[in-house]
Image (cartoon, rainbow, N blue to C red):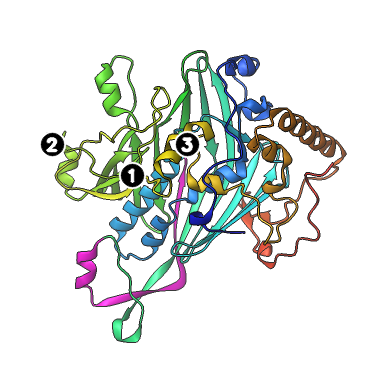
Amino acid sequence: MTVDLRASRRILPAPMIDRSSYSIFSVIKQAIGKDLTKFSIPVVWNEPLSFLQRLAECIEYSSLLDQAALTNKPVERFHLLTAFIVSTLSTNLERMSKPFNPLLGETYELKMEGDTPFHYISEQVSHHPPVSALYIRGQHWTLSANVEPKVKFQGTNVVAVSEGRWILRIKKIVPTSRSASQSSFQSCTEEDDEQNSNVNNHSDEEDEYTWTSPSILVHNILFGRLWCEFQGEFDLQHTQSNQRSVLTIKTQSWLSSQSTKTANMFKYTGFIYDGKDKLGAFHGNYGHCYYAIDNLEDAQFKSSSSSCCSAGGHNCIHINTTATVSSPCDLILTPSSRLIWFRSLSLMNDNELALRSQYYFFTPFALCLNEQVSSVVLPLTDSRYRQDIQYLEKGNTDAAAAEKHRLEEQQRADARKRDNEHQPLWFKKDENEEYVYTNEYDQRQFNHCPNLFSS
């Protein structure tokens, strides 16, 4: 399924239903202290995407992975990879709707071509516990993960954790002379590349990087406007060395002043290490930007600079306000801050940007995920064939709720009849009990796939 973002739709068939008369607490109060992924919630709190489709949004800024694969400078590569992980966090902040739970055996495929090509394949490989396996192939890299979401209601908040590690493999660079190759590239460090007399090709050997996702906290479940933030830190590790990147999200203290809380909102800092030695530093706003700090001394002391983030793009809207247009990023820069990434919705015009709050705050990338296609053969297990999601897109919540209930009951009935453990079609367990891609989907032989969503 090949998608062209510039030609894709910019709006859904119908806006989301007004939720002002609905209470999310009335739904989840029975699940206090329990895993919310095992509870069915009213369709009014869903967004018209399957969780497999929502996971595909992690690859919106895949160009960062392409750039990382093209540089042979370890610190610069860590900056690009860490910025990529930050970009995956930014897709969540405005989205207070729950994606539909995938059925066991459900799949989703997405393919992009052009300057930043990739091929995304995912499958729901387990129902209890719910596990989504995904595999993404880029130009010189692959990204895979087993995602097991766990959502618990704690007091006035909901905590969501995605267990399972992400594994990125990048083909190693083999230097060759310019006279032996007609290809070249330009990385983020243009000045250094101009001085380099070699260009780089890639071998079959791979560098491997792994990380796990930080937890996300949803506030104001009892009253007020829903909003969310990430907590903790993540550790991006290069498995063949002692090099790693550690990002720490700034925490909010009840004793802090309101101005301090506002200044720290969505901010993070971090360092790149080789063992215990610091090689680099960075900071940013995970709803908007990532900056490398090229002078380590700048990262050791509180900046006295009055210079704020100069990147354009679109800062995430803080859902706890009445604003429908994002405010400028207020990240304070250091003298050596260097922009690596910022969030951009440049494909949307002003009118489309103003209407985003009525359409689940979808980005152009999210809007294309469930767009129906007729030119490509997909397995009948693909999320695009789910009628409950299509009904919700069209604003027919009654039909969406009825179809969602039918699919859930059908899945329970199938589970009661199943004698053996479910065997996924496109992934299999390895010696580490992780689901790995078999490459068989690429053959596009779908005759044996069940008509998963039929009655």
At horizontal 19% and vertical 51% (from top left) the residue drawn is 294
Q: Nearer the viewer, residue 33 or 259?
A: 259
- Say whether disc 1 or disc 3 marks the residue closer to the N-terminus: 3
Does residue 252 belong to the magenta stretch?
no
Q: Nearer the viewer, residue 160 or 206?
A: 160
Pinpoint residue 171: horizontal percent, then vertical percent: 44, 67
Dot 1 and dot 2 residues touching (CB under 8 Å):
no
Q: x, y percentage for residue 451?
A: 80, 50
Q: Which residue is mark 3?
A: 92
> For mark 2, what is the residue?
305
Q: Between label 1 and label 2, give the one nearer the viewer.
A: 1
Q: Is residue 168 above or below residue 343?
A: below
Say what amino acid the circle numbered 1 marks. Answer: Gly
Q: Amino acid at mark 2?
A: Ser
- In the rendered image, residue 345, in percent from the top left (x then y), is placed at 40, 45
Q: Which residues are magenta?
A: 189-214
Residue lying farthest to the bottom in this orientation = 179
Which residue is at a point 37% across and 48% down the rendered structure image? 82
Above-or-below relation of 135 to 187: above
Q: Sequence-wise, which precedes: disc 1 or disc 2?
A: 2
Measured in 3D between alpha carbons, the distance from the residue under mark 1 to the one under mark 3, in whole angstroms, is 17 Å
Can you say which quadrant of the picture contains the C terminus?
top right
Which residue is under mark 1?
A: 313
Q: Looking at the image, is mark 3 or mark 2 earlier in the sequence?
A: 3
Q: Are marks 3 and 2 in contact (CB under 8 Å)?
A: no
Q: Marks 1/2: CA distance?
A: 22 Å
Q: Residues within 10 Å of mark 2 (few under 14, many from 20)?
A: few
Label 3 packing within 10 angstroms: few (<14), some (14-19), many (20+): many
